[in-house]
Image (spheres, rainbow, N blue to C red):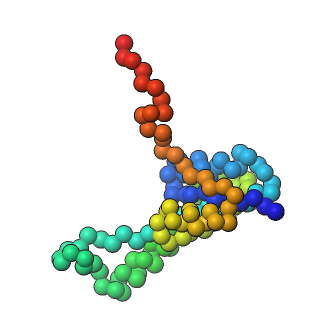
Amino acid sequence: MARTIVVGVDGSPPSLAALRWPSRKRDFGMRVVAVRAWAFIPPVPIAEPGLIPLPPVELAATLESQRVAAEAELPAVIAEAFPNGVPIELDEHVVEGAAGDALVSEADAADLVVVGSSGHGGLARPARPSV
């Protein structure tokens, strides 16, 4: 049975590193699922609080264009991570919703979830005294 690794991908350098990580392990029974989440963030209201300044037809078109953009971005990010071709079995999932929720949902069928790290903060390294 293939082991499944879910990788959160947003195009950032840490997410590219997370995407490359399973390929360094080179387990041929492994399946990697690259997950790109997207969510619509409504524009700031221009009138009464809670009003969206887009008619419903434009809102639907905006949602569709954001979905299409996310679907186009994932293969581009994968190509950036693997310029010489993808060396592992890789599935692509574009999911509407918050990134954390998407990863938790995908993790139900996974053995491991990998995400990028932008750093550990100031506590990971001891402070060096200035001389």
- Position of residue 82 relative to residue 47, above or below, is above
Q: In the image, what residue occupies the spot 48% across and 39% down? A: 120
- Against 97, is 18 above or below? above
Residue 118 location, x and y as percent?
48, 44
Can you give x and y, in whole percent of width and height, for residue 69 in the image? 48, 69
Q: Nearer the viewer, residue 100 or 59?
A: 100
Position of 91 compared to 73: left or right? right
What residue lies at 48% left-to-right and 70% top-to-bottom? 97
- Can residue 32 be seen here? no
Q: Farthest residue toward the left? A: 47
Please indicate, yes or no, whether residue 113 appears anywhere in the rendered image. yes
Q: Is residue 125 above or below residue 78?
A: above
* Relative to 110, 9 lies left or right: left
Q: Farthest residue in the bottom direction? A: 57
Residue 37 at x, y = what percent?
51, 65
Among the 4 quarters of the image, the one containing residue 65? bottom left
Closer to the camera in the image, 129 or 62: 129
Residue at (71% x, 45% y) in the render = 24
Image quarter hosting the C terminus: top left
- In the picture, residue 45 is in which quadrant? bottom left
